[in-house]
Image (cartoon, rainbow, N blue to C red):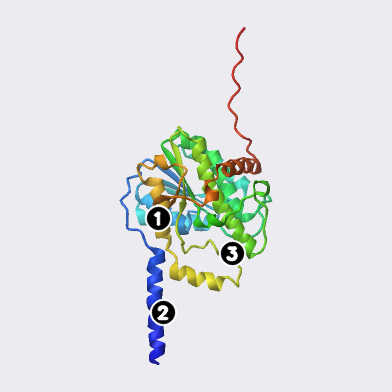
């Protein structure tokens, strides 16, 4: 009996040490007022997105929750309005698994909202399957849909500058293996689905890197962020046999959504980060991504391939006017 109690005590002590070591909740940070600024948060109906939107609203921003479910999106917007006292929080429908929906969202936003200062590309999934556009679900939701959305809103971001794009990536980019000739191919099975997730997170890191290069001198800056290991619904599509392992780990060791929102919020609101545009952040600090995340050639190839897949041709400078004789 004593041995059992001692073993239980040791396990509890080990759990407590691991819990605090792995989660490391960040202290509350003072953030500037965001009154007069407009933000979009994709996946804003729950998890990190809702926590991010809530804090932006608390600071006075006008916040658009871009999400697939109208019921969850409207409920989240209502809840945030009540909790923050900010009436300028609204839901707009966006399904990143449909490029048609992305275009419809961008068109409606540009028609209804005159400004855009913060674009938080937060939504993400880890699931097999194929979208209506013929691409892998995980790669399209996590990268292609956000790539198209950013391009469609880029002119409004530039007109509203200074403005920022924050792309929620992950340390899982370390296992990414992007093949520019096979971008977006649908996958099946748990292992291929996880690889597609890692590939999409590498795409997030490279997207921020190349976007920063192309936006130099525009006062639009961008950042890729690792939010930490967060207990959200991102693995809700995991196989049934895997959930008994993932769920306890998430509840015991992962950060909660508010803690996971700290680094995205830091990159969205912290003053003086312009010189770090294109960089990868974790725990509210710039960090070096894994080598593939620093490959500028791969970043360019990803950009060009993504333009092709979403139906955007490369933007060329206008031809010089003919000289008079």
Q: Position of residue 2 (x, y in %)?
A: 38, 91
Q: Nearer the viewer, mark 3 or mark 2?
A: 2
Front-most of 239 and 302? 302
In this rendering, the answer to whether 102 lies above or below 243 is above
**Label 1, residues with CA under 10 Å away: few <14, some 14-19, many ≥20:** some
**Label 3, residues with CA under 10 Å away: few <14, some 14-19, many ≥20:** few
Q: Position of residue 79 (x, y in %)?
A: 41, 57
Give the mark, 1 or 2, whose residue is nearer the N terminus.
2
Residue to which mark 1 is pinned: 283
Q: CA distance from mark 1 to mark 2?
A: 28 Å
Q: Position of residue 193 (x, y in %)?
A: 62, 60
Where disc 1 sits, the SS reads: loop
Q: Position of residue 164 (x, y in %)?
A: 44, 42
Front-most of 232 and 282? 282
Residue to which mark 3 is pinned: 237
In the picture, the quarter occupied by the C terminus is top right
Answer whether residue 84 is visible to the viewer in this image. yes
In this rendering, the answer to whether 100 lies above or below 9 is above
Give the mark, 3 or 2, whose residue is nearer the N terminus.
2
């Amino acid at each position: 009996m004593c041995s059992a109690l001692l073993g239980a005590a040791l396990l509890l002590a080990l759990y407590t040490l691991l819990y605090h070591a792995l989660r490391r909740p960040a202290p509350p940070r003072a953030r500037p007022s965001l009154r007069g600024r407009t933000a979009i948060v994709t996946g804003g109906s729950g998890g990190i997105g809702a926590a991010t939107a809530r804090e932006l609203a608390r600071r006075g921003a006008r916040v658009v929750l871009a999400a697939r479910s109208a019921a969850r999106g409207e409920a989240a917007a209502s809840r945030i309005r009540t909790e923050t006292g900010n009436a300028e929080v609204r839901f707009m429908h966006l399904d990143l698994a449909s490029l048609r929906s992305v275009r419809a969202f961008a068109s409606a936003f540009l028609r209804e909202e005159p400004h855009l200062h913060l674009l938080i590309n937060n939504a993400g999934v880890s699931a097999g399957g194929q979208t209506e556009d013929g691409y892998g679900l995980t790669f399209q939701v996590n990268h292609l849909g956000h790539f198209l959305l950013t391009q469609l809103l880029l002119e409004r971001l530039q007109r509203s500058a200074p403005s920022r794009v924050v792309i929620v990536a992950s340390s899982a980019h370390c296992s990414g293996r992007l093949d520019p000739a096979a971008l977006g191919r649908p996958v099946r099975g748990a292992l291929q689905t996880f690889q597609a997730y890692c590939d999409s997170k590498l795409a997030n890191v490279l997207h921020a890197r190349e976007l920063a290069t192309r936006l130099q001198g525009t006062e639009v800056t961008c950042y890729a962020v690792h939010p930490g290991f967060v207990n959200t619904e991102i693995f809700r599509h995991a196989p049934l046999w895997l959930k008994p392992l993932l769920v306890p780990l998430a509840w015991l060791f992962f950060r909660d959504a508010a803690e996971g929102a700290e680094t995205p919020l830091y990159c969205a609101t912290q003053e003086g980060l312009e010189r770090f545009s294109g960089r990868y952040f974790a725990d509210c600090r710039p960090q070096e991504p894994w080598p593939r995340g620093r490959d500028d050639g791969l970043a360019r190839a990803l950009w060009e391939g993504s333009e092709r897949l979403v139906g955007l041709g490369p933007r060329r400078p206008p031809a010089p006017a003919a000289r008079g004789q």
